[in-house]
Image (tube, rainbow, N blue to C red):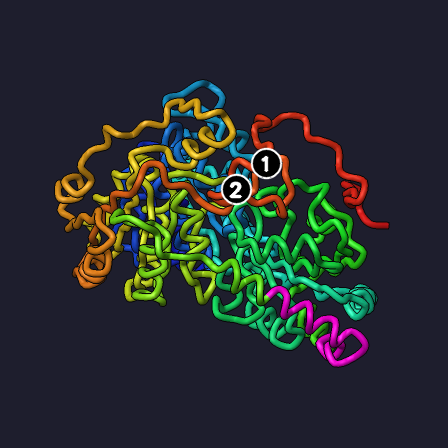
Amino acid sequence: MNGARWLVQALEAEGVDTIFGYPGGAIMPFYDALHGASLKHVLVRHEQGAAFAANGYARASGRVGVCVATSGPGASNLVTGIADAMLDSVPMVVITGQVATPLMGTDAFQELDVYAMTMPIVKHSFLPRSVDDLRWMLAEAFRLAREGRPGPVLIDLPKDVQLGAAAHLPVHVPSPVAPVPNAPDHSLHEAAAIISQAEKPVVYAGGGVVLGDAVDAFREFVDLTQFPTVLTLKALGALPPSHPCNLGMLGMHGSRAANMAVQECDLLIVVGARFDDRATGKLAEFAPNARVVHLDGDACEIGKLRAAQGSVPGNLGNSLGRLNVVGAQNEGRNGAVRAAWRNTCAERARKHAARYDAPGDKVYAPALLKRMSELAPDAIVACDVGQHQMWVAQHWRFHQPRQHLTSGALGAMGFGLPAAIGAQMEDMDARVVCVSGDGSFMMNIQELATLKRYRLPVKIVLLDNSALGMVRQWQELFFDKRYSEIDLSDNPDFAEVAHAFGIQALHVDKAADVEDALQALLDTDGPALLHVAIDTAANVWPLVPPNHNNAQMLDPDDAGSLDVGQPVGATPSPPTSDSKETTNALPA
């Protein structure tokens, strides 16, 4: 029994069943210990793929994802996936090999100070100096990854610690995870009083609803109050898409109904959201007439970007359940006004609903994605980053939030395929779809070999516009059509690439053929790729331009009606006289 073998047994005791990794010199004792263990190891073809696969596994399941790499370049290749987990609050434990402790600090072969390098992007880092450190470090790593606001934790494991005698170490026992405390009674009373006074309330929900296991409580709250509701990218699926109160996603590429409701409301009930800039647009003009009641499991988010008149830190499910009584106010003094407000919001949702009757014979990506979501309503979708990511958010009808795996805060291209692998390994019976673009797909295309090796039945929808689509769209609209380094017209034949990896592939480039192509893709046994050729000039609409508020959305017909030529990053104009200033100070 050495340190590496003890560690493998401890991972099994933590309930880990699958890990993703790539071996190398400094982590070799750990890989030797894996031989004969019950852990399923998935050999990816690049360490970034390991981090994203563990990330996707964790997002789909809510359990801790685990990835492993060697020292030096192995560890540094994990960094993007670790950062993505930190920014999107994904529970992960990352194990990296390190040179032996006597060699640390000597510039030894494949030595990097991974502990320091990852410090800003993990909840905590551990560097055991002896085998005895493992007994408490591993338990702490898993506890921290799970507890409170989830996130990644790093264990940088020197080679001599892996090889050290460990027969004296006790059997590993997982540490208990402290529950998120309930909100103080006074905060709920204050929030209830504010809510009872509102005439035009809107619920603004974020990914914290999912992280806090509060989806059921959230749905009950909306059902009872019947308040119009908007969702962030990470909250999609928290409310059924057909729910009459669901106005869709808000923000830069949100629905017009959602953004207009937020801009006109007199109360914003923020549930597990953080006022991200992609959701708020110009923050100084976001919900300018609204008071704010902010519920969050992470008290640090409350008041960080927008002062809250009602602060409710604590367990979201408990807080929402205790606030449900406020739904009775719909029948009270404000009942008729609120009913008119609901009708206005619902009418806007109908009026501005997406249309799918695009002219011409080319494939219209939004229509294809909507139809795919109808054919595979139970699918888990791992999405890459770019125009296709926003089209998925706008047009795929998610019924549960863990169906939607997307790199939100970091926006990491190359996320989709390895995240789909992680989700499929978590549940081999699940239907998993990867939606990617030609730019993103090339960043981790080597993971097609992983799909083939493990016979994972992931279905890939590859939208190919022969360009870096989102960058091209911004250059068209905001940089006077000065197109710079966005041409991908020399893409390979992606169907032939898939065939080279032993994966079945189909191609579609006509709208009339989409239905048959989608059905053929879903009916294919094992992994398969559908290559979809779309118009290079296609844009994502609607769009809130930079330095504008969410009411100033652009559609194709009015793209020239606003002064959107101000370069990104330019000094913002001062807020208008009737807009509400925001503050970075905590509420009094």
Residue 3 versus residue 179 in the image, above or below? above
Kindly tell me whether residue 4 is visible in this rendering. no
The magenta stretch spans residue 342: yes
Residue 66 versus residue 567 in the image, above or below? below
Question: Is residue 372 or residue 473 the one in the foreground?
Answer: 473
Q: Residues within 10 Å of mark 1 (few under 14, many from 20)?
A: few
Cβ–Cβ under 8 Å for marks 2 and 1: yes
Kindly tell me whether residue 202 is visible in this rendering. yes
At 48% across and 61% down in the image, what residue appears? 401
The residue range painted magenta reads 326-345
Question: Is residue 134 or residue 543 the one in the foreground?
Answer: 543
Q: Quadrant of residue 227?
A: bottom right
| Residue that numbered label 2 is attached to | 558
| Residue that numbered label 1 is attached to | 562
Residue 167 point in image, percent of width and height: 41, 51
Q: Is residue 150 left or right of residue 95?
A: right
